[in-house]
Image (spheres, helix red, strand yellow):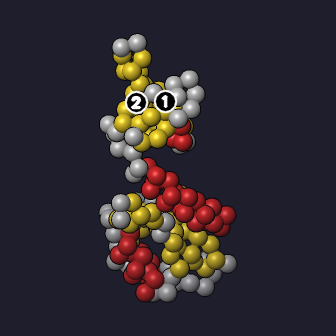
């Protein structure tokens, strides 16, 4: 029965390991995103490999160029359920789109608030926070105050 397992690669060798494992006819999944025209690993130093624990020879995997070792928990190899792999494949595209949007604002950029009590006010973009939230600096009563808003509540000037 085929299962997905987790492999740790040598530093910055994900692509080398992927290519060499693929050349040996192993099924490998390397989640990536393209940021500013550069391909970036979503899980640096980790790959997923699909192996049949009954019929496939696992020995060549460990000695493949770019591979450090299998991830284990004690003596048990780290299995990744199929539904997790499928979810990562689906989320990979959304992550790529999110990463492209993250590049749209840079720290220090001027933005204008589109909704709420501060609609129309100019602010300074600080950084991206979790869950599509951003931090901005808004001048209130003579002082800059950090405010968290949804990303879609501001627009670049």
Q: Which residue is drawn at 61% across and 79% down?
A: 52
Q: Is residue 113 above or below residue 51?
A: above
Q: Is residue 132 above or below residue 89?
A: above
Asked whether residue 76 appears in the rendered view, the answer is no
- Asked if residue 123 lies left or right of residue 96, the reply is left
Image depth: mark 2 or mark 1 in front: 1
Q: Name the residue under label 1.
A: 120
Residue 141 drawn at (x, y percent)? 40, 12
> Label 2 vs label 1: CA separation?
10 Å
Residue 90 drawn at (x, y percent)? 61, 63
- Asked if residue 43 lies left or right of residue 117, the reply is left
Residue 120 drawn at (x, y percent)? 49, 29
- Check the picture and name the quadrant holding the C terminus: top left
- Check the picture and name the quadrant holding the N terminus: bottom right
Nearest the viewer among 20 and 69 is 20
Mark 1 Cα shell of 10 Å, populated few (<14), some (14-19), many (≥20)? few
Q: Residue at x 51, y 58 (%)?
A: 97
Using the image, tell me which numbered label, if any, was put on residue 123: 2
Q: Is residue 129 above or below residue 17?
A: above
Quarter of the image for residue 56 reads: bottom right
Looking at this rendering, what residue extends furthest in the top direction?
Answer: 141
Q: Which residue is drawn at 36% across and 14% down?
A: 142
- Asked if residue 100 lies left or right of residue 91, the reply is left
Local secondary structure at mark 1: loop
Nearest the viewer among 110 and 11 is 110
Residue 13 drawn at (x, y percent)? 34, 69
Quarter of the image for residue 138 reads: top left
Local secondary structure at mark 2: strand
Nearest the viewer among 52 and 40 is 40
- Asked if residue 111 lies left or right of residue 25, the reply is left
Q: Which residue is drawn at 49% across and 87% down?
A: 25
Asked whether residue 42 appears in the rendered view, the answer is yes
């Amino acid at each position: 029965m085929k299962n997905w397992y987790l492999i740790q690669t040598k530093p910055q060798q994900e692509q080398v390991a992927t290519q060499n494992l693929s050349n040996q006819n192993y099924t490998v999944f390397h989640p990536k995103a393209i940021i500013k025209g550069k391909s970036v690993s979503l899980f640096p130093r980790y790959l997923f490999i699909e192996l049949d624990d009954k019929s496939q020879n696992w020995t060549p995997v460990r000695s493949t160029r770019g591979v450090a070792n299998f991830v284990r928990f004690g003596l048990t190899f780290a299995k990744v359920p199929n539904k997790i792999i499928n979810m990562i494949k689906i989320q990979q595209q959304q992550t790529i789109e999110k990463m492209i949007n993250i590049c749209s604002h840079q720290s220090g950029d001027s933005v204008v608030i589109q909704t709420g009590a501060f609609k129309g006010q100019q602010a300074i973009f600080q950084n991206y926070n979790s869950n599509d939230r951003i931090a901005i600096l808004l001048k209130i009563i003579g002082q800059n105050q950090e405010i968290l808003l949804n990303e879609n509540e501001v627009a670049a000037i």
